[in-house]
Image (cartoon, helix red, strand yellow):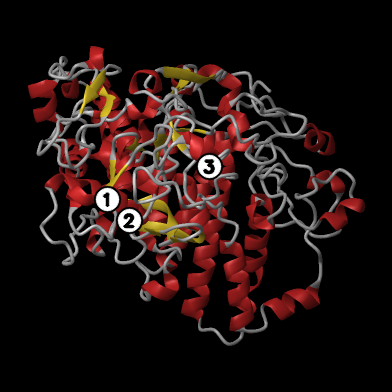
Amino acid sequence: MKRILNIGLAVVALLLGSCNKYMDIVPDNIAELEQAFSMRAMAERYLFTCYSYIPRGNDLQRNPALLSGDEFWLNSMSNYSQSDYPNWYIAMGAQNTNSPLLNYWDGNNQGGSSDDHIRLWRGIRDCNIFLENIYNVRDMDEMEIKRWAAEVTFLKAYFHYYLLRMYGPIPIVEENTAVFEDPNNVNFERQSIDEVFAYIVSKIDGAMPDLMVDVMQPVQENGRVTQIVAKAMKAEILVTAASPLFNGNSDYVSYTNADNQPLFNAALSMEKWQAAATACREAIETAQAAGKSLYKWIPPTTMITRPQQSTIHQMSIRQAVTERSNNPESLWVNNRSTANQSHQGHAYMPRSIDPARITNQQTGGFMAPTINIALAFYSKNGVPIEEDYTYNYAGRFELRTVPLGSSPYQYDLIPGHTTVGMHFDREDRFYGSLSFDGGRYFMNNHTDDILAYAINARPGGNAAATNSPTRYSGTGYTPKKLVSYFNVIGDGQAFSTYTYPYVMMRLGNLYLLYAEALNEVNGPSAEIFQYLDALRERSGLRGVIESWSDYSINPNKPNSQEGLREIIHRERTIELAFESQRFWDLRRWKTAQEVLNTPIYGWDIRQNTAQTYYRRVVMFTRTFTQRDYFWPISINELRRNDKLLQSPLW
């Protein structure tokens, strides 16, 4: 059936020269294994080692979905090298086969060079060791052993999935190879996309009965794999398998194995979309039965007056991501990847509470959302600004001054401040997700939402590029959505951070996956709008049908499968902005060649006047080709294993 891939310690590679540095032989050290699984406490350490290989989504250097797409761009004055931010250099077209950037296959170039827990093949190896030995632990009952084994089985499946998204067809690692295996059996081949997806799903299904439905002790067990986690991730995996990159993709018909069997199935299968829809529904039902729901912010009793409804909407989307406790929307989090002071400092725009003071050296975010993404958010009427016939789209780059005194804008924009037209009359997810010149920043220490920090990003202001040689936004935006409102900023180095774990899956994401799958199966339906509208209602928008009917120049768009597909894609871009989803979405939809071959825009941030500051500047002109859908494998690895194919078109 499948070639057995063998992963282990580099020392044995000296015995078998053709083996990969990180895909070699597991040491046959019986004494060490017996010690590791001699008692529950030791086995639990090994269990947590298996968890430690989950890629850390809050790692700005190593998460490809943060800087390799079009949501963020770094400033050009910081002299970041490829070794600092290889994912950003991937966005600039520097990926290569000699020394691949963010190399999760070999564990190099921030794919694990300084942290073994990023090397996914090693993680799969350790999962196999755990599964081979966990039943030898003497002081554990059978139910707990089965539960731990199920968790690790899921992790092994998830690591395969992560590699599959990056590299396309990959080898399947069902078990480790014995130490004295014939070298010819150590070399391995890629398996077809359909085989790998089927293997991943079968492993998750097999693990499901022995998993707990939800964590029973949230403080101690948050982040552990449960049935909710397994079903939610199975839903994502099946939606990915059904998407155009992997379903009916004829671009790689010549990409075949040694037996001339195609590794991509060029025939479109609607059954894959039906399986995805079924999995999404089951995941939602399980999550909701366990009490999961969309996060809705409740204002603290310390506020002098009840905040504006718009503030509640904005805080709901922020807290859906940054609330670490009692968050009913979180389905799976990675507690080993927390948004700490460094991460949130990269995203936090103001450097003082006073618009005219520059004091704190830990803030001044350089994670800079692009104008491209800022334009993607809806108007206040819940439709794209280019479709809203009441919105002055032609004047989106023209200057406007916020009215003085009380006005509908005073909670989101600074009265009397001159800013750009596209900052007016946008939906609350825009103001909850982005910080910008002339905007406001509501935090926990504010007893009235009108007292929120005023952001001045022009020279001399509290968020200006001139405040630091490196810590500034190169585009004029920072991701407010990624900053906890419980943080407290002070002078000098004082930045008290409310850390939160990286959210692997939340219920809102699952709603959107379900809507997408249902639309692909049968086109528009009431059930699709039910889930889309639940997210929109949380953000203060009316339903899709009503909004498009009343405000769009294309009022019938939601009534066609193609039109609704476009709406669902846009909803994912907005709702999940800056959450490491868009990068993978553009790939699986096979739209990256269209979307990413456009210039990256920012504002002329070092200019003093509004007229000069608000000039669009081309930050970079990207080139995304068909081969960029998948990571290349290093030339050295191909030399070690003559049965391993290079990734398509590399």
Q: Is residue 75 left or right of residue 424?
A: right
Helix, strand or loop under label 3:
loop
The kind of residue on which mark 1 rests is Phe
Helix, strand or loop under label 1:
loop
Check the picture and name the quadrant holding the C terminus: top right
Residue 642 at least partly seen: no
Q: Earlier in the sequence, mark 3 or mark 2?
A: 3
Which residue is the site of mark 1? 442
Residue 471: assigned label: 3
Q: Nearer the viewer, residue 454 or 187?
A: 454
Badge 3: few (under 14), some or many (20 or more) residues near its Cα, within 10 Å? many
Position above or below: 322 against 522: below
> Which quadrant of the view contains residue 297?
bottom left
Asked if labels 2 and 1 touch by Cβ distance under 8 angstroms, the answer is yes
Asked if labels 3 and 1 touch by Cβ distance under 8 angstroms, the answer is no
Residue 485: assigned label: 2
Check the picture and name the quadrant holding the N terminus: top right
Q: Earlier in the sequence, mark 1 or mark 3?
A: 1
